[in-house]
Amino acid sequence: MKYTLSRNITIADTNDFFEGDAPEKYSHGYYILSDERQETDFLINGTIKYFLDKFFIPKTQQEVLQEIEAEVNSDASVFEQTCNTFLKYLIKKNFLVAENTEEPLLSKETLFREGDIIDNYSVLRILSNKSNIDIYLVVDTRNQYNYVLKLLNKNKVSNEHHYQKELKQLEREYEMLYDVKEIPSISHVYGFNKEKELYAYITLEYINGKSLSRYIDEQEPLTKEDCLQIIQGIIYGFSLLHDCKLIHGDIHASNILVLKDKTIKIIDVELSRKVQVENEQVLKFGGVYHYMPPDRINNTTSKKFTTQPDLYSDVYQIGLLIYLILYNTLPFEGFIWEELAFNIKEAEAQYHEESFLNYPVPIPLIAIVKKCLNKKPLDRYANAGEILEEYKNYVFI
């Protein structure tokens, strides 16, 4: 059988991909493989690119082996098994597809535009255009209230099975949000609609706020008292969630909105969601992977997140939010997953006595963050309520 490179795959030089700003160690001899279906980028070396380049036109494995044999002047049997194993992996990942495979052309566009009507809602603005999800700011034409619609767009999904899987996830998110609707710091949900063939959506409270990282970067002047108030709001919000015996499971800076009065709202309560990432996947600093606790990851397999979230992992991620507010950075870095996972599991966080805003960080607060970020789950706080108790007793005045 002949195989060819998927039309969803592109390969670029690292310096071209990063516009000349690639990390020094990866600036020569490495390439970025982009998978448009998953909106994911991978770091590959020259050998892998050499092999993939062979499939820009359809070829059998034997044809590729013969080409390599001629080019390297070596018996193909020497590397046949390696090529066979690697080919199976590339086919499994859908980087290579069988000749004449009808790959679905997935839409990258939102289903609706400004001014369009979705049931009783008029679209005011497109807030986000994610891989499977459109997020709209809308106004209810019946009462003129603003809401946010989180809409699953079937045009962005590869097949019916995948759509039904994503539909169940969206419905589950609605159910979780409905269960915590009495908690003021949780984004309120008002409805779930799945009657249409091309989409389903949940109706959410419109929150006029900024993500935590954006707020830290843009809000001026930001004082020590402001930071401590936001920290307390975050801890308090998650303590209410934990009091309900619920785990968020996906805590990071983009899921915390800060309002003008410095109160906070917790969004994206997709509880206990399991995420997977690969060793060579290129990471955006500050993204969700940087918030993974050491006890939830395994840097030796392709299924990197090996355990479900629990209260201890929530506590770890809350500690990272506090660290971000204090230092405007996260303690562990890595350009690819393999580097990041090693640092999360092995490296020690650095705690400076002065914040990035040049105020002295309270020593008890450093102690709280250290305990949250302990490598061993049982040596952390058991839940956010325990963090709040220590915070109120020793830090906030």
Image (cartoon, rainbow, N blue to C red):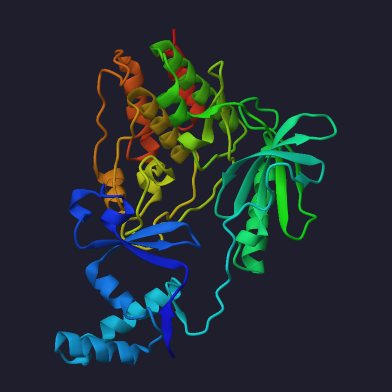
Give the image quarter of residue 168. bottom right
Reply above or below: 165 against 360: below
Residue that sits furthest to the left in the current view: 73
Give the image quarter of residue 56. bottom left
Where residue 307 appears, as percent x and y from the top left, is 45, 52
Query: Does residue 347 appear left or right of residue 197 in this picture?
Result: left
**How many numbered dots are placed on residues in this image?**
0
- What residue is rendered at 35% in x and 62% in y? 301
Q: Is residue 83 visible?
A: yes
Of residue 307 and residue 31, the one placed in the foreground of this image is: 31
Reply above or below: 365 against 182: above
Of residue 243 and residue 231, the one placed in the foreground of this image is: 231
Which quadrant, please, contains the N terminus? Answer: bottom left
Of residue 103 and residue 89, the one placed in the foreground of this image is: 103
Where residue 171 appears, as percent x and y from the top left, is 69, 50
- What residue is rendered at 37% in x and 29% in y? 324
- What residue is rendered at 48% in x and 20% in y? 230
Q: Is residue 239 visible?
A: no
Query: Does residue 124 appear left or right of residue 285 in this picture?
Result: right
Residue that sits furthest to the right in the current view: 142
Residue that sits furthest to the top in the current view: 397
- What residue is rendered at 42% in x and 16% in y? 220
Which quadrant, please, contains the C terminus? Answer: top left
Where residue 243 appears, as percent x and y from the top left, is 59, 30
Reply above or below: 222 against 66: above
Reply above or below: 148 against 237: below
Query: Does residue 61 appear left or right of residue 155 in this picture?
Result: left
Where residue 116 appears, as percent x and y from the top left, is 74, 45
